[in-house]
Amino acid sequence: MNYDALPTPTSKPEATDFLQTLLNKNLRVGTTDGRMFWGSFKCTDSDCNLVLQHTYEYRPPSLAQLQEAAAQDDEAQKGKVVMDMTSRYLGLVVVPGKYITKIEVEEFASQLKDTLSERKQHQPTQSKMNVEIS
Amino acid sequence: MEQSSRLEQLPRELKYIQYEHRLETQYLPAIRALISKDLSEPYSIYVYRYFLYQWGHLCYLAIDPQDSSLVGVIICKLEAHASHSPPTLRGYIAMLAVSAAYRGHGVATSLVKMAIDSMKSRNADEVVLETEETNIPAMRLYERLGFLRSKKLHRYYLNGNSAYRLVLLLKQVDPDSAADLALDDTDIYR
Amino acid sequence: MGGNNNDGIVAFDVTKKFRAAAGTLELGELVKDGFFSLFESVGALEIMDPKMDSGCLAPGESLDEDYDVGRGLSPEEVIGIIDQLLCLEMAWYQGYPLSQTLLTNVYIDRMLEPEPMTLEEADFIRDNLKGDQRNDDPMHAVLRSYCLGLIKCCWYINDRIKYEHYYEEEDFVTNTYHRSLLDNFDVDEINNEIMAARKLVHSIRHRITDELAQALGFRLELRTAFLRAIELSVMRSNPESLSLPWTQMKAVWEAIYNSRHLGQSVPEAFSTKIQRRLASTMPPRPIVKLSTEETYKHFKKLFVDGINVLNVLNYHDSQSLLQNFVMTFQSQKPQPLVYIRTLLQSFLFKDMIILGKLSIRHVLDDDLSLVVLPASKLLDPANDLVEAPHHPRYALAHQMELFRQRAAQSYLDIFRAFCQNRCRIRRTLCHSIQDWETVQVDAEEIDQLLQIQIDERPLVYPPTEDTEGIEPTFSLPLSSWAYLYKLRLMEWIVQLGFELEIYAPDELGGMYWYLSELARSRARLVDRISFFTKHRAASQQENENTSAQEAAFTRSRHYLYQTSLDAAITWEMADALLNLYAALGRLGLVVAPPRPYSTDEMRYDVRMKPFGAIGLPELPSWEEYRAATDRRQKETGRLLEDARLSLEQAQRGLEVMGRLTEKESFSVGCFERWLGGVKGQMRAVERAGVVVEVVKRKLQEKGEDKKGKELGLRVEVGKAVEGEHEWWVVPMVEEIEVA
């Protein structure tokens, strides 16, 4: 499903429908301290307190790690370093709405053509994600 | 338990109320704060939702009428215990906390009594709970009401302390049923 | 199209829409996956709550360790770090997770993460790989090799514990948080590293002083010996040689403790921050602080237990093994650590070969011979050789094999149960008695088939002069054996209840009454078994027994004597305490709480629940129980006198028991511990006698009508007093001034 194309839900039935389509999809939830939580969406309440299952925590490299990497990397000259986010498994978590800065939903590119949304899960193929930091 | 802050006498009569959903905004944060101060295991918001949405009628609050602040709370559940046949209706006292300054005045006992009365009126067969072996006041409180220790649970809590399972039977057991009432090993909480 | 494409995955930013949608929900209304139960959220971690989220940083706090593992270390600091690691190692053995213990150490963390692929990489200074700039600080080499030995040791122990029966998080936490504990490295290579470090320390001893060099040497030696002890334990033979590394550790441990003052602590090298990088579904927890003294005590006990547990390998007889070795070993206070209990289990059961050399059948038949079937043709191995199906011996072999198949697991389960923690032993036995109830029923069926096959002649029991009109009965050996175990299990459940402080003070009298009933049932059963055995011995004598058969009868006679003596001591002591507590209750010295929500009868139901499903012996009715425990028909003075008489009998019994030899008491390999138990009972009996006398005297002084404090007495009831056997809760009595 192309979520960009959806209108922002205003009525209660629309809103519930929208949230229901997200259930069991993998969400990437950013928090105020810069971490990102990647897990399967199970539950929310009116305050956006999200329950995520099988969750991994991703944390951007610290300043010291960045500097170290920059010192060893020729690319750094161009003002750009590519580094892995460190990750670890946390299992079942609750991310309180008040700390959430960003919510992203994952879809398979191959399924975007389908008009019907299919709820499919994929397992993490890698525990690290490449992030670009400029 | 903090002794220093204990009042010689309660300044005024406390008000006891049954929890209702409309009280969530006013009291849920205070309930969480009071309990997380007392209990060794921390719980997320949804643990409270789990209990309060299904069994709000088994949750009682002690309120100081002066400023409507929360002084004590008990949170319970009541459900069929499936590992018995025929299943028994088992009450469970999940959390009990009283603000340090108000201890020693029977607030906790009043809360427990209200919860038991409420479970009794809903046909409960028994009430169970776990308590830390080092928590002598809690054990005394429950044992004075009629609870018995049914088993000891080795290193039950994250801090390494052991617990006792306490049981209060509310109805006579049918001798032909439920061979292991409250003795089964399906310990639900850690 | 939104989002970044990564492996065919597209991510859409739905922040605004999500918030808007959630905002339309009522307070407390949920949108929830139907298969997800909120009950599961009991285990959920709430992000950004410092009590639950180990990754939550305080404002301005950095994730990075400030500690520089490359800095030079003095020998004193290395000793300090090692000694701190020993405290954490012991805390792990006691059941705390690695995340709160060894994995809080920065050196260990750097050695394990990222995961080393070669032994050279298993170093806290990874730059060392770069050839000529190699760090040659000898203190780094010493600490590294110590840690290598320690981590490998942890790997082995974790692995062994997982292999046997234990309760995760309750007894032990095997979680390694996705860290590999040098799983793939060869122990010999690690031993070489430690040896090299020991040589290195020796070579620089003049530079760092002999004293420091020795102190470091002892610590390295401990690791070598520990690895050796673990490696050898799989052999399960020749306990003398297995004990060598344990003895070595015990010796070097004293030297380590005595040199602890040389160490200089390095608290910065330990940090809970490391938990932020461990894969963990657990909330953050503090570093476990075990004091040096505690650590010393527990390691010392570990080494002593490590030596003692090896004695189990010297098999003598089935009763010495279970009743005495396993039970007395496990009843030590504090209980042996879970690793030692794992060793005990692996010695007992590994690969279904008992103690590495005996078949299950061997031990089971030994026990049957000892208890009910000495020199019996039912146990004759020659039966198995008969191939003709119509031959009576063929049928015997077949029926006995059916019985063994039925009973072997239940029998071994008792051993297994006694290898667990004390709380679990009691709970497991509560389930086992129901299993033994059916073993007994099945055994009786087989007994009935066998008595036909061997053409057994029934006898009148109990024996009487006038047998007229009395139906003779059969010996029923197999079901008698099963019944005896069931009764023992029931007694143990009650007795462990005293040890674990399950019973309220006003319940003690009643529970001692029930224990007395069980012990009397056991004595009656043993009397019946003895009667039939004696009769068979006499009739077999006519056909001239071989000396081996004579020996088997003698051994069985000793066993039956010992167990009936034990039963008699048990019921006498239990009767004494029943009478004492009944008197104290009546005198208002032990007061029951008000209990507005329960009745005496309902509490009896709860208390006796484990025994409710047992048909034989049938659970006494509430009325029987009440009459037996309030003892209304007797005056208080009479109760105390009865208690005194029972204690006298118990004391006499214990004196006889204390004079039994190792073989007569069936405690070969554990005689000292067994005798310690007898002495503990003796101390309880003696003090109970004093308590009875004091109460009697006060009662005479103050008059029968006085109650509670008016008697000038204060009684405290808790658990058994230190030094006294933990199954006998004798009250503490103190004389006080009467106001």
Image (tube, grey):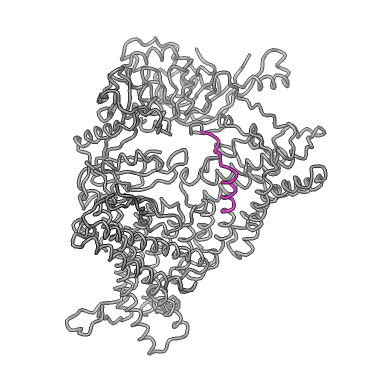
Residue at 59% in and 55% down = C303
Q: Is residue C390 above or below residue C680?
A: below
Residue C531 is situated, as x and y percent measured from the top left of the image, at 32, 79
Residue in front for this viewpoint, A100 or C507 = C507
Q: Is residue A86 above or below residue C630?
A: above
- The vertical placement of B139 against C431, above or below, is above
Asked if residue C580 lies in the magenta stretch, the reply is no
Instruction: Answer with left or right where residue C705 lies relative to residue C383.
Output: left
Residue range highlighted in magenta: C285-301
Would residue B86 appear left or right of C556 to someone viewing this image?
A: left
| Quadrant in the picture for residue C145 | top right
Q: x, y (%) of residue A21?
A: 38, 20
Q: At x 46% / y 45%, what residue is drawn?
A: C170
**Image quarter (top left, top right, bottom left or bottom right) of the N terminus of chain A:** top left
Q: Is residue C725 visible?
A: yes
Which quadrant of the structure image shows residue B47?
A: top left
Horizontal arrangement in the rendering, residue C56 relative to residue B72 (left or right) = right
**Which residue is drawn at the image coordinates 74% and 38% (left, top)?**
C140
In the rendered image, is residue C497 in sight? no
Q: Quadrant of the C terminus of chain A?
A: top right
Q: Residue C588: image x %, image y %?
A: 26, 51
Q: Nearer the viewer, residue C457 or C275?
A: C275
Above-or-below relation of B94 to C467:
above
Direction left: furthest residue: C469
Count the marks: how many? 0
Q: Where residue C569 sits: x, y (%)?
A: 36, 67
**Residue C298 is one of the magenta-drawn residues:** yes
